[in-house]
Amino acid sequence: MYARCVDRDELSADAQPAITAGNGRTFAAFPAAVVVPIVNHRERLLLLESKRRRGCWEPVNGAVERGETLLAAALREVREEAGPEVRVRPLGVVHAETFSYDAHVERMISVVYVMRYEGGQVAPGDDMRGSHVRWAGLREIDADSLRLIPPLDQAWLRRRAIDSCRRWDADPPAVLQADIQGGRRR
């Protein structure tokens, strides 16, 4: 089966782009991004000072590139933005939402993929090169009134990321599916 991307010209001006599978089933096509809260063993979040919004802090994040799985995109963004020496353990998705990115991207999917920091020097690169780095706990973020970019500006989501790490540390997850290669189950 092959998927065919429907060209925007084939759709009405306000319609969402779609992809049609070889069997005829149609799916909405959305741009996607990953937000990657990295939590250390002291329950502190890795934050980088935003290059686009000075005075604001953000976790590792970025666009999912063509052909990538969510996990591959999250790991690539960690290498690019936090540095190639940073070692993380992917824990899982804790939140997903759609939002309006701008006038040209009316709907975008954002997936929050929590990772546990396992070591290595944080050295911001790619579009975060030169950013200040800090580790901040939940109380510190609230007490210092740190300005965080969405969606980590929401206290409940920061707590969910930390709580998820606690749960995984206490009871590591069972493997629920076979290894995935190239986006397909083997």
Image (cartoon, helix red, strand yellow):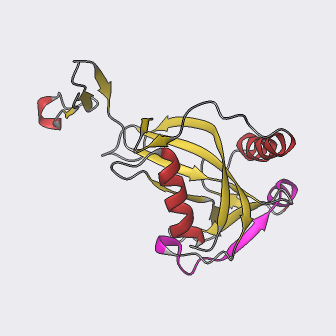
Q: Residue at x 30, y 46 (%)?
A: 104
* Residue 6 among magenta residues: no
Furthest residue in direction top, as rendered = 24
Residue occupying the far left of the picture:
9
Q: Position of residue 185 (x, y in %)?
A: 45, 34
Q: Quadrant of the N terminus?
A: top left
From where the camera sits, is residue 53 visible?
no
**Is 106 or 116 nearer to us in this picture?**
116
**For the image shown, how many numbered marks are present on the structure?**
0
Q: Quadrant of the C terminus?
A: top left
As displayed, is residue 144 above or below residue 116? Answer: below
Magenta run includes residue 135: yes
Which residue is at the far bottom? 130
In this view, the residue in front, 52 or 25, is 25
Q: Is residue 148 left or right of residue 109?
A: right
Q: Percent position (x, y) of residue 124?
A: 58, 75
- Asked if residue 120 shows in the view, the reply is yes
Q: Is residue 38 above or below residue 83?
A: above
Magenta-drawn segment: 126-142
Residue at x 85% of width, y 61% of height = 140
Q: Quarter-wise, where is residue 173 in the image?
A: top right
Q: Measured along the vertical axis of the image, is residue 118 above or below residue 63?
A: below
Position in image of residue 181 (x %, y %): 44, 44
> Residue sitting at 33 percent across and 45 percent down?
103
Q: Position of residue 182 (x, y in %)?
A: 40, 45
Residue at 67% of width from left, 60% of height from top? 88
Q: Quick check: 8 left or right of 64?
A: left
